[in-house]
Image (cartoon, coloured by chain):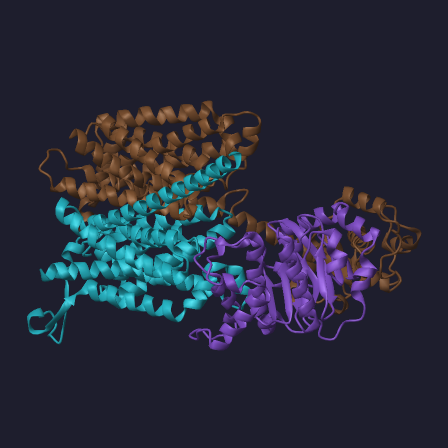
Amino acid sequence: MDAFTLINPPSLWDNWLAFWSFEDMNVLWVLIGSILLGMSASVIGGFAFLRRRSLIGDALAHAALPGVMMAFLLFQTRDPLIMFLGAVTSSFIGFFLIDWLPKNTKIKADAALAITLSFFFALGLMLLSFIQGLEVSNKSGLDKILFGQAAAMTEEDIRLLAVVTIFILVTVSLFFQKFRLIAFNQTYAKTIGLAVNRYELLLALLIVMSVVVGLQLVGVVLMAAVLLTPIAAARYWSSQLSHILIIAASLGALSAIISTQISYLAPAMPTGPWMVVSLSMLFIISLIFAPKKGLLKRYLEHKALRQKVSEENILRTLYKLVERQSFQHHHFNQADILGLRSVPADCLQNTLKLLCKKSLITSDPKGFKLTEKGLEKAIQLTRRHRLWENYLNEQADLTPDQVHQQAERIEHILTDEQEAQLRLELTNSLLDPHGNPIPDASNHVSPQLKKVQEPLT
Amino acid sequence: MINDIWILATAALVAASCALVGVFLILRRQALMGDAISHSVLLGIVLAYLITDSRSLPVMLGGAVIIGLVTAWLSDSLHRFGKLQSDASIGIIFTLFFAIGVILVSLYAGQIDLDQECVLYGEIAFVPFDTITIGGLDNDKESGFEIGPRAFWGIGIVFSIVLISIVVGFNRLKTVAFHPNLAISLGINVVFWHYFLMTLVSITTVASFDAVGAILVVALLVIPASSAYLLASSLKSMLWLAVAYSQAAVVIGYSLSYILDSSISASIAVSAGILLFITILVLQVQKKLRQKRVITIKMVETVKTTL
Amino acid sequence: MTHKSSPLENSPLSVKYLSMRYHHKPVLTDVSFEIPEGKTIAIVGPNGAGKSTLLKGIMGLEPIMEGQVNFFGEPLANQRLATAYVPQREEIDWDFPINVLDVVLMGRHGHLKLWQRPSQIDHEIAEQALKDLQMWDFKDRQISELSGGQQQRVFLARALAQKANLYLMDEPFAGVDVATEKTIIELFKDLKSKGKTIICVHHDLNTVGEYFDWIIFINARLVAAGPVEEVLTKENLSKTYGGRLSLLNDLTEKMYRTQLNKAHDTD
């Protein structure tokens, strides 16, 4: 239980207070740095996602590792700028390799990604283990970029981080329109004379930079998630790209705050994994609860639709019963309904109760009866059902026995305009293919139906 | 000396198993799934250990298979129900699993015989010291008969499973990899064979874990198989070539690590990559030469006709 | 309405109310037809009419929303081996390390148990199939080293090796040379004389009357199906190549989008 002793309860609260009081200026800087990183990586990752290269960040982060090690080997310094340049260089080589392999050899895109990722990572680890065998100074801490360690960041690191991330955010907002166009429709962008290649290169550079600058904080191994997960989560909240990107940036910032805190409260803990776990939690929350596209919303919508369908089906069945009795009887019991339509008994009772509540039908000892409002609705449904049957029969060459099932569904979603168009296209809108009359479209009930109206009113 | 042999033998088996499984990953275009499962397996190992308090081979294999299949299944479900691109859903799932794995490792570092280092590199240099003894009393290694390193026997068993599976299921695996729709039209259960392959990937990565860690195993899965893909004209030759490439990588990598005093597993992976790039280079040069020859022949002909 | 003439006894293929979609877009709606045995049948329609999708739905390669497909009066599972499918050329991974003979032997795998290897007889069948298509000389070639027409012949040989009774082919004439086209026509005649049935997705309206006995006109729905002399009419062509029925299209899409088709548990 080594790690737990690091977060022993009495000091946890104190640490937390100390964190937020920013007594240590460094804490503030790290916090700001990681928020900036979370935001810029989420935004730039958004474009990678839209270009259908979700895992490019994974490969590029791994590809940065040998660059860092080479830079250290060559210059024997841990100056952040030199490390940064080394990482950017090798990340870029990785980027071109991922592009080059599928274009020039039989190797497919997914394999090219996995090859680049694992080869560069192995190379980095090999160099790291080689460095650790050398007698050189200040080599300790190089391995921290594998999983990230916010607490180990120096002031210089953070300054570089801030500069780079702000650069990324500013560039993206400047070129937002162009990037969006290219991400959405590259060929079109080319036809209107946009220098697509140049923008692609810029985008690649921004991705590489945000990956590299995040290594100290998140680490090589899990950087992919910081680019990918926020945008995937944000997509459930909106359909507009600018909103999606803002939401993604906020999610990235939020998870940065959470993970930086954890890194301070338990210094032995690597930051990267916590950032990924908090991002994933935000993703799961989005997936389930997002107001428009979340799973819960989709489930509820579907349930409501089912309810609507079963209500409307009962209404139409009641109308059919009235029609079969030549509009003489208006009271029917459950057995009558079940005679025409097979419905589970408990479902039928529920639906009937709901229909009563909406005063579309009334219930008395004689049975269930359509109210005026219910009758109107039932006529509308029946009309739409039969019009659609006619349409399928006339225009789609389906036989009368083939049309019923389709009409059973379409009746629920036909709109007034579509109904009007249907009438225009049909040559016959008086009788359906089975020979049943199609009730009048206007809300004036036809003379035949007047007979029904009288006892009702 | 005997230790070197154990290390080499273990590395050879790891590389061969990975190469065989990797061939099917490459052909099925599932390289990223291999990447994902090899990361997720860490969580499987840690959870299996925390739940059962044992590091025996069946427990580890069980944990890995379960987590591997869960990864594959969740990625697929997220793709379908969450309406995400399939590589995005793979990325979200495996980074989460791996992150949880790393957190658990650092939380229970004292209890589990694992740390962040060995997650990355594996500890193939220490493989010979963790041996299995049979016939001895509990906790008394001296009285029993030592049969060799645990990792060696683990990967040995897995290698046999992989080999038998490929030999027995060769035709089915071939058809499914070649054209899934053809396979379906022949009545082959493609879903079953997909998850079967994922199971093979899971057990291979878990058995390789001690030796090469969670990430370098990706290199052994995809790189030798890709080299073989460039040259092979039949599935059988691709399997043989992949194994040959992997064994060459082991030998070169081991020497390299000896010279540079670097990590053995990383050096093996790097050697595999270098072999791939040499192969690509040779093929590119050949292509260029062939083009040049065609051009010269054409030029000679035009000269002849003009004369 | 020729397609609803009296139900055929054990028709090689009968399709009832087949509906398929791509995401929320309806691709095929309520397609029903039955085909006679021992004929060559073309599926004809404009681009994006759902011809290949129909073939895939029939073979169970893509999920069908609704409907029923029967082969010789039975579901596909019982008639797998009696049915051979030739995919579109574009769908095949030509880089795959496999040679011609191995591709053709795949046609025999359905007949083999998991642990069985192709026997001498299987090899002879594959050899005969390759010889029938004049491809025996190429048996050891990797498949990417063949011309387009040769590649097509390999896959026809594979179907042939399956010794099926019903052949479903997705555009076998697309992008092949004249010699291959002739070979395929010869093959059709030969198969027909043995009482086999062939269904092809076909693009070329100029040759459809010549190569085929029967036509199924498709444009997101069934337009007509029947013998060439009956259905190859101006009216059917203009219906097939005229636009789609917009209302049918819009409302079916809306139905899929709202998942209305799953909301009906009371049917």
Residue A247 falls in image quadrant? top left
Q: Compared to C228, does C9 lie above or below?
A: below
- For this view, does C168 lie left or right of residue B262? right
- For this view, does A420 lie left or right of residue B79? right
Q: Nearest the camera: B82 or C185?
A: C185
Q: Give the color of chain C as drawn.
A: purple
Q: Nearest the camera: A363 or B225?
A: B225
- How many numbered discs sit on the rendered protein? 0
Q: Which residue is pictured at 51% across the width and 46% down the height?
A: A294
Q: Which residue lies furthest to the left in this view?
A: B142
Q: Give the color of chain B as drawn.
A: cyan
Residue A15 falls in image quadrant? top left
Q: Compared to A104, does B151 lie above or below?
A: below
Q: Where is residue A278 in the image (x, y as percent from the top left)?
A: 35, 43
- For this view, does A44 lie left or right of residue A357? left
Q: Position of residue C217 (x, y in %)?
A: 75, 56
Letter of the brown chain: A
Q: Which residue is pictured at 30% across the width and 43% down the height?
A: A274
- Do we see residue A253 in this rendering? yes
Residue B88 falls in image quadrant? top left
Q: Which residue lies furthest to the right in this view?
A: A447
